[in-house]
Amino acid sequence: MNRQRVFGGVNRPSLLISLIPVSFLFVALITVIVTSGADAVSEIGPFILLSSTAVALGLSMVGGVASRRGLSVGFKRSASQILPAIPILLCIALVATTWMLSGVVPTLISYGLKVLSPKLFLVITCAVCSVISVLTGSSWTTIATLGVAFMGIGQVMGYSDPWIAGAIISGAYFGDKVSPLSDTTVVASSTAGVDLFEHIRYLMFTTVPAMGIALIVFLTVGLTNGGEHTAEAGPMLGALGSTFNLSPWTLVIPAITMIMIILRLPTLIVLLAASMLGAIGIFVFQSHDGMGVTALLTNLWSGVALQTGNDSLDNLVSTGGVLGMLPTVYLVLSAMFFGSVMIGTGMLAKLTDAFTHRLRRHTSIVGATVCSGLAMNCCTGDQYLSLIITGNMYRSLYRRNGLESRLLSRSMEDSISVTSVLIPWNSCGLTQSTVLGVSTLAYFPCCIFNFLTPIMSIIVARLGFKIPQPTKREIPVCNPA
């Protein structure tokens, strides 16, 4: 008797077949990182992802587990979640260029150098980014605006790029995770069938301890090995003043942007408006030689390379433009195709089934959810798709074992929403590494909150804190139909 079940009119893939494409992807990426460095992932990554896609597709066709209908469903699911990120990525490139040329970022850098305490810089950066993300519900917008300014301030103070990026990302993703305005928070709660505010309250038991530890680490690093107002700060401030008009009026642009975010306008609309305001600000606040419409369009496409007379400042005020964002776009699209095939052939479902087949205790179930969430982030390359798939696959398991739905929604947020930025080929990791100019693997160990949260989720589950023990009456009878 053939014990394989039928999936979409064809046999479901075996566990071995399902593991091969993922193993190929990981081995190829590790090889590239070891031989060429982490920065090479953005250049070679698309070829590795497309090769992994070809491996998965070839195995599914040879094994008779591919169907046109299944692949079509997989593509639609993956594309519907990932394609909307493409225009957002391009708009982020436009915002970075226009806010630099209009003097917004240089003004923020200048004021930050004068006001912020070097020893407290990391902890203040993390706290400010978390507050802004709570108010806006968007880690991407926070990092693309305030995050860029904080990177410049921290570099001048003598902090290493990974530590600055780690503080920015930790704060931004904490705020995004607990904000009722966040789309990932809404997706996680709705997928698990939990009230939004009940979901957020339950998140606090794992999120607050993780964030508390992160703030202590950033404070300790700042007090013991913190940056200082280096001798280079004075000449850099002088070069900033001679290159840009550092007027407080330039801050009208980010102020209007924040108002639009608070009003919960769509992210794409906010970023488009922010880039247009920045473009207008170039002509209103600055007097760059030869800056006309043609020159502006050229800078938007190819980026900014200003000559300020200070080498460090030249690197600081340089942006890549749309052209510099294209490698990230290619990686996102390649990740979409890989996720489409893994979903459409049933390989992703098979890998998840292998995790959940014999799970009974709440600690092992939460642990499997966390591991599956991380695997989904790796396989699909998108946090929204990972949340939806994980929720659908684990919802019945939690129900069968009498576990609350809010435990599922929290476990998904702890393992998916905050770790997507740590994966080099995930849309979040690709975007933030490009925006901040720091490779994903470089800032990974400094994102204390992000890698600590899934660990905290398992620890709290093991302690059984605020996890009601199921009784026989609570466990519903499974209906074979």
Image (tube, rainbow, N blue to C red):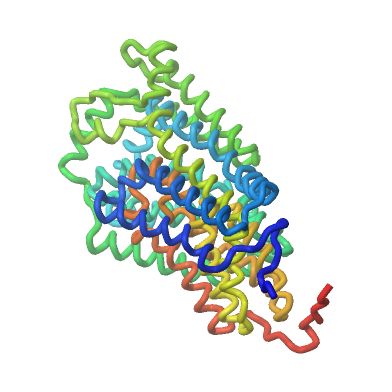
Give whichever of 134, 72 is nearer the camera: 72
Position above or below: 167 against 92: below
Farthest left residue in view: 231
Residue 250 lies, in percent from the top left, at: 44, 27
- Residue 55 is left or right of residue 397, and the answer is left
Q: Quadrant of the C terminus?
A: bottom right
Residue 54 lies, in percent from the top left, at: 49, 48
Position above or below: 24 against 143: below
Position above or below: 422 against 217: above
Q: Which residue is found at the position 23% from the left and 25% from the top? A: 308
Q: Which residue is found at the position 18% from the left and 26% from the top? A: 309
- Does residue 129 appear anywhere in the picture? no
Give whichever of 225, 328 is nearer the camera: 328
Q: Which residue is found at the position 51% from the left and 48% from the top? A: 139
- Residue 275 is left or right of residue 346, and the answer is left
Residue 56 lies, in percent from the top left, at: 51, 54
Q: Which residue is found at the position 31% from the left and 12% from the top? A: 289
How many numbered marks does the figure carry?
Answer: 0
Farthest front residue in view: 1
Q: Quadrant of the N terminus?
A: bottom right
Residue 275 lies, in percent from the top left, at: 50, 27
- Does residue 182 appear anywhere in the picture? yes
